[in-house]
Structure formats: C-alpha cells, structure tokens
Image (spheres, grey):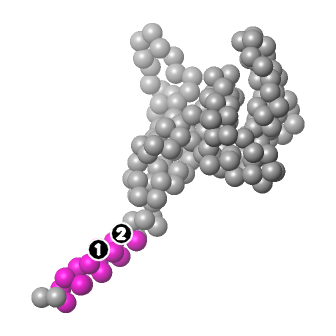
Amino acid sequence: MLDDKSKSTILSKYASYIKENNLRSTPERDVILAQVLELHDLFELEDLRVRMAEISYYVSNATLYNSLNLFCRCGILYKHQFDDATSRYQRMPMRNGVQYLICRECRKVKMVKDPEFMSFVNTKRYNAFTIDQFNVYVYGLCNNCLRRLKKEALLKKEVQNCRK
C-alpha cells in the first residue's frame, strides 16, 4: 500500500505528463489510476478489471489497456512481459536489483532480492555505460509444481509397470 506522499508524487507526475502532452484528463483515467495505486506490486489487466467491477465502475478493456499504456509512458508503471503472453504491471520506481522467479508451469512470479548478486552487478563496469537499475528474470519450476510433476511421473511409471 502506498503512503499519501507517494500517491501525491504519482498524481503530480501524471498531471504534469497530461499537461505537457496536451492530453485530456478523463474521469475514467482518474478512477483507473486510483485503483492502480491500490494494487500490489505485480498485477495483470484482469486484476484491474476485477477491482473496477468491485467498485461498480465499468469501462471497456480498450480503456483499461490504453490507460495502462499511458501510465507506462508517463513513468508511473513498468510493463513486464514474461515468457507467456500476459503482461504484468508494476508501479515505478521499481526496486533496484530484483530477481523475478517465474514458474514455467503455473506462471506464478515471485520477487526476491539477492544482496550477493546485487553486489556482483554493482561491481561490473562497462565502457561508456553506467548502470542505474537492473532486474533479472529467472525461469524454472516452483517447488509445488516440481513436486506435482514428480508425483505425476511416478504414478505414470507405476501404471506402466502394472501393465507389463
């Protein structure tokens, strides 16, 4: 949950972007932004749609999608595109040095911070480039999916042995 100062900063950034780019501030965008500020770290369009339905404020998918893209352009949100087709959004500023552990089976995403890895990256120097932020996507299987897949493989093997 964001504190009042953070919300105020985001709303100010949004208002400035709208004004600088000669865009209209619509009631729909304002309500969508208010709901985005209430969502947790990573969320999908569907999470926002559910949130809007909970407050009985219905807007089209196109309006939700276009609003999220606008919030990304003005630096309020960051759009993650993991290996599946679903986009996930995160409020800016993102935490520096976050590793996203993405399960290939159930698609759950877990954010972790590894100080040792952060230290390694911070010691790297590149010609004509200064790192100010980084994030790493790590794909694999979560423990729940790994256990389930092993159990399914074991059952399949037992069934094959019974048929012999």
Rendered residue at 79%/46% (across/down)? 57
Q: In the depicted view, which residue is nearer to us: 90 or 21?
A: 21
Q: With 45 as the anchor, is 122 left or right in this view?
A: left
Rendered residue at 66%/26% (across/down)? 70
Visible residue check, residue 80:
yes
- Residue at mark 2: 149
The residue lying furthest to the left in this view is 164
- Residue at mark 1: 153
Q: What stretch is highlighted in magenta?
A: 148-162
Which numbered tag is attached to residue 125? none
Visible residue check, residue 118:
no
Looking at the picture, does residue 113 appear above or below residue 156? above
The residue lying furthest to the right in this view is 4
Q: How crowded is mark 1: few (under 14 residues within 10 Å), some or many (20 or more)?
A: few
Q: In the depicted view, which residue is nearer to us: 118 or 157?
A: 157
> Would residue 154 be counted in the magenta stretch?
yes
Q: What residue type is labelled 1?
A: Ala
Q: In the depicted view, which residue is nearer to us: 158 or 46?
A: 46
Q: What residue type is labelled 2?
A: Leu
The quadrant holding residue 92 is top right
Circle 2 sits in a helix, a strand or a loop, which is it?
helix
Q: Residue 2 placed where, x, y %?
A: 79, 41
Circle 1 sits in a helix, a strand or a loop, which is it?
helix
Q: With 81 as the anchor, is 23 left or right in this view?
A: right
Q: Residues within 10 Å of mark 2 (few under 14, many from 20)?
A: some
Q: Residue 161 placed where, x, y %?
A: 18, 86
The quadrant holding residue 11 is top right
Rendered residue at 72%/41% (across/down)? 59
Q: In the depicted view, which residue is nearer to us: 23 or 92?
A: 23
Q: Residue 27 placed where, x, y %?
A: 82, 31
